[in-house]
């Protein structure tokens, strides 16, 4: 049985979306949406690594470091259902575009937001007085896009050559 559940990651995104749709009238609501979206991203990346055969202890050793998890995922290629079972590099995750108003923001920028002053996930989001991050209106669809990408993996994975 997998340690990291993509369905759980999707459920976190669904709750985040519901909260977002209710409105972010309070700092607590905003914090909750940010936290759930980041947690969903973490689980999606860890599920991809588990699918790739990376030992659970090695995955856990990355903690909650989304940048390190993404770097690990980028060393694999995944066979994807939606693309006629073609192989796709984990580096494609970095290039996934998240629409926001009339702009597009790439997933790599969102995952690496801590490098540019965002609160460190998870502790500074859970406990910080002033949470700084990408807008929840961007994080929530980003977490959904990442979970959806991960769901499209057939289970066939190989190390990049």
Image (tube, rainbow, N blue to C red):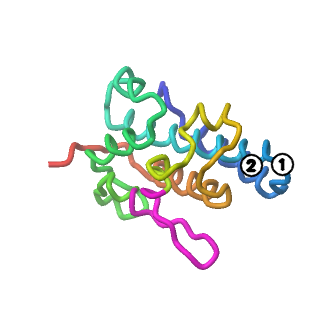
Badge 1 crowding class, 10 Å Cα cut-off, few under 14, some 14 to 19, many 20 or more, is few
Residue 26, percent from left and from top? 83, 48
* Label annotation for residue 26: 1
Magenta run includes residue 99: yes
Q: Is residue 69 left or right of residue 25?
A: left
In the image as oriented, which residue stretches furthest toward the left? 161
State the SS at label 2: helix
> Start and end of the magenta stretch?
94-109
Between 149 and 120, the residue placed more toward the observer is 120
Q: Residue at x 37, y 37 (%)?
A: 49
Q: Is residue 84 left or right of residue 105?
A: left
State the SS at label 1: loop
Name the quadrant containing residue 125.
top right
Between 80 and 145, the residue placed more toward the observer is 145
In the image as oriented, which residue stretches furthest toward the top? 57
Between 68 and 97, the residue placed more toward the observer is 68
Residue 111, percent from left and from top? 47, 50
Q: CA distance from mark 1 to mark 2?
A: 7 Å
Q: Is residue 39 above or below residue 118?
A: above
Badge 2 crowding class, 10 Å Cα cut-off, few under 14, some 14 to 19, many 20 or more, is some
Q: Residue at x 54, y 34 (%)?
A: 5
Q: Is residue 46 above or below residue 56?
A: below
Q: Is residue 46 left or right of residue 144?
A: left
Q: Is residue 157 above or below residue 53?
A: below
Q: Do the residues under discs 1 and 2 have CB atoms within 8 angstroms? A: yes
Q: Residue at x 70, y 47 (%)?
A: 33
Name the quadrant containing residue 98.
bottom right
* Label annotation for residue 30: 2
């Amino acid at each position: 049985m997998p340690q990291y559940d993509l369905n759980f990651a999707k459920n976190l995104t669904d709750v985040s979306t519901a909260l977002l749709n209710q409105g972010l009238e309070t700092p607590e609501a905003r914090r909750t949406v940010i936290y759930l979206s980041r947690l969903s991203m973490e689980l999606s990346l860890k599920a991809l690594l588990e699918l790739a055969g990376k030992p659970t202890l090695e995955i856990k050793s990355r903690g909650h470091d989304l940048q390190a998890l993404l770097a690990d995922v980028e060393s694999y290629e995944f066979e994807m259902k939606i693309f006629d079972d073609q192989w796709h590099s984990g580096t494609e995750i970095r290039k996934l575009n998240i629409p926001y108003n009339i702009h597009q923001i790439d997933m790599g920028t969102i995952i690496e937001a801590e490098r540019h002053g965002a609160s460190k996930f998870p502790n500074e989001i859970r406990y910080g007085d002033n949470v700084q991050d990408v807008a929840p209106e961007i994080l929530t669809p980003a977490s959904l896009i990442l979970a959806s990408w991960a769901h499209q993996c057939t289970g066939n994975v190989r190390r990049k050559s």
